[in-house]
Image (cartoon, grey):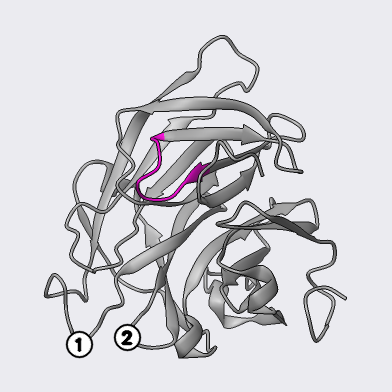
Amino acid sequence: MNDVVAEPSGLIRSRRYPAVFWTHGDSGCAASIYAIAGDGKLIRAFRVEGAGNTDWEDIALDDAGHLFLADTGNNANDRRDLAIHRLVEPDPRGESDVVTVERTYRFHYAEQKMFPDPKALNFDAEAIFWARGQLYLLNKHRGDMKTELYRIPEEAAEHEVALEPLGSFLVGGDKSRYGGMVTGADVTEDGRFLAVLTYHALFVFERPADGDQYLSHLVNRINFDQEQMQQVECVAWDGWSLLLANEDRKIFRLDNPFEKRTKLFP
């Protein structure tokens, strides 16, 4: 990936502009989004007005051409300003290189009573996705090896809301090597399959025919060689393939994420 994008932390494929993906940097990086090609080559950088990059952790896209930036990183579990910003997807080859936040969703976790809560450091989040008219978030636990699924309601754009979990999944992994930590997510365009990324494995879930219990039906798990993948934090569907990227800007393509295998690559 182009070195203009320092510490990429989110990735999503455009539905409007062919062969374009959107990415952004992590905390401390510029408040900018970047249009890139599938091989990481930079197409265009856009400065985001109306929101600073406190700790942007993921990016999603809805059916109407809105991008969502998750300012939800909360390593210390002490933030009281968690937000997801919505902006209109810009034209990568348009005239302007500025894009403006048009709506901000604000929330906190209903379970969190202390900031931080030393007994439950489970209120960080690095994964959002849009599916079937709803925006969802998966959190990143440090107190145990689980992740929990939340829905972001539309009223969060009017006033701060308390999020209640819809379901949970035991991610597992080696806790001494950042096991149990979800770092990204994306859903297929039809909303059927959800890819959930961690430092140690990729999980693919299938949504039930009714409801939104995405974490209830695991269809595949692929373990990583963490020495090879390093700190992998980006995942995006590209048709029926997946693109993964780590903080060192290395991109990996997984052509059949439904295939049972013992390791990611030969």
Q: Amino acid at mark 2?
A: Gly
Q: Amino acid at mark 1?
A: Lys
What residue occupies the far left of the structure in this picture?
114
Mark carried by residue 143: 2
| Residue 62 visible to the viewer | no
Segment tinted magenta in the rendering: 24-31
- Of 232 and 240, which appears nearest the observer? 232
Q: Secondary structure at mark 1?
A: loop
Q: Secondary structure at mark 2?
A: loop
| Residue 241 visible to the viewer | yes
What residue occupies the far top of the structure in this picture?
95
Residue 126 is situated, as x and y percent measured from the top left of the image, at 44, 61
Q: Residue at x 57, y 53 (%)?
A: 132
Can you identify the residue that label 1 sits on? 119
Residue 147 is situated, as x and y percent measured from the top left of the image, at 44, 78
Quadrant in which the N terminus appears:
top right
Q: Residues within 10 Å of mark 1 (few under 14, many from 20)?
A: few
Q: Is residue 147 above or below residue 17?
A: below
What residue occupies the far right of the structure in this picture?
266
